[in-house]
Image: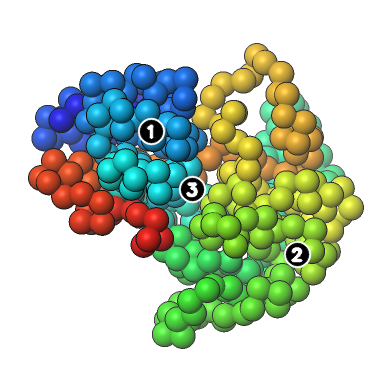
Amino acid sequence: MNIAFFDSKAYTRDAFQQRNRDGYRLQFFEAKLNRDTVELARGYEAVCVFVNDDLSAPVVEALAELGVGLVALRCAGYNNVDLKACEARGISVAHVPSYSPHAVAEHALALMLTLNRRIHRANVRVRDGNFSLDGLVGFDMYGKTVGIIGAGKIGQCLIPPLRGLGCRVLVADKFPKPDLARQLDFEYAELDSLFQQADIISLHAPLIPETRHLVNDQAIAKMKTGVMIINTSRGGLIRTKSLIDGLKSGKIGSAGLDVYEEETAYFFEDYSDLIISDDVLARLLTFNNVLVTSHQAFLTREALANIADTTYDNLGEYQAGKRGHELSHGICSRCT
């Protein structure tokens, strides 16, 4: 089977080449998949794509005309895929529902601890010969209330280390599981109650219409003054202009963002010699109490290996004749 990889980096190539035990023919393109690059998929039976590739209806139409039968996502999210267009053109879609929830949960915790103790600022200071401690006062995590929005596999992985630090954990989830709450020792709460009580809020919900801009002006108004907000899920969960207003007013004490709602043009690329023309992103980067990482929460050796293995499983099932919902990790508009 011939497979075209889009938006591929060195770590993508290394992981997939090392795990390619079935001898698939792989072609790696650095370009993202979009209307301008879709012609690169000519001659390939499957395309393997990532979070910032464009699989809107026009791109899907072009893929179908080129003979592509499978879109293999090497990520969990699929909000960048027009599933109805894929179904209409007979293109199967499969994703990687779980690669390493521990990797993302650990990154969320790292953002919390770094922001709280100002590690990012302290590191820059001492490298410049400044050993002053002014402005670096944090707080004890012990006894603080952390609100987790979305208790899927990642949210669940974050709870034990937080409880180990002595935090009280509140969870807002569409499908409460009382047995899980007893097992992991946390409390369920309605979203408004979580906003009102949490010292730290960590987002782990999927990006769907009802969660887009979950954190907005109205939500922020309900939060504690000085709240810390962490997002390692999807950028669109936060209305960024509302976040900036909250930071400017002091209502939001700090923010750790591994994702950004308009990240497609910047994340995963080197712009160090260029000007960032996105005024909203540029403004975010001026705050010393905001820590932005470039969608790297997934980036561990274990996660990359799991992504490759699950993707190859999806490809193997497709090659064996399974299509659409027959695929173990297949996605369709009717089952999401």
Q: Which x, y percent locates residue 27?
A: 27, 22
Q: CA distance from mark 3 to mark 2?
A: 23 Å
Q: Quadrant of residue 63?
A: top left
Please name which of the two marks, 3 or 2, marks the residue nearer to the observer.
3
Q: Secondary structure at mark 2?
A: helix
Amino acid at circle 2:
Ala
Instruction: State which quarter of the image contains the C terminus.
Output: bottom left
Q: Nearer the viewer, residue 124 or 218?
A: 218
Question: Going by the image, does 88 lie left or right of 228?
Answer: left
Question: Going by the image, does 165 lie left or right of 68?
Answer: right
Q: Nearer the viewer, residue 159 or 312?
A: 312
Where is 91 relative to 218, above or below? above
Q: Which residue is mark 1?
A: 61
Mark 3 Cα shell of 10 Å, populated few (<14), some (14-19), many (≥20):
some
The tag earlier along the polypeptide, 3 or 2, is 3
Q: Which x, y percent locates residue 318?
A: 17, 44
Q: Residue at x 42, y 20 (%)?
A: 37
Q: Nearer the viewer, residue 332 or 296?
A: 332
Q: Which mark is residue 219?
A: 2
Is residue 9 among what the camera can see?
no
**Decide: marks 3, 2 in contact (CB < 8 A)?**
no
Amino acid at circle 3:
Asn
Q: Secondary structure at mark 1?
A: helix
Mark 1 Cα shell of 10 Å, populated few (<14), some (14-19), many (≥20):
some
Q: Which residue is mark 3?
A: 79
Q: Residue at x 45, y 32 (%)?
A: 58
Where is 41 relative to 204, above or below? above
The tag earlier along the polypeptide, 1 or 2, is 1
Q: Quadrant of residue 17?
A: top left
Is residue 267 among what the camera can see?
yes
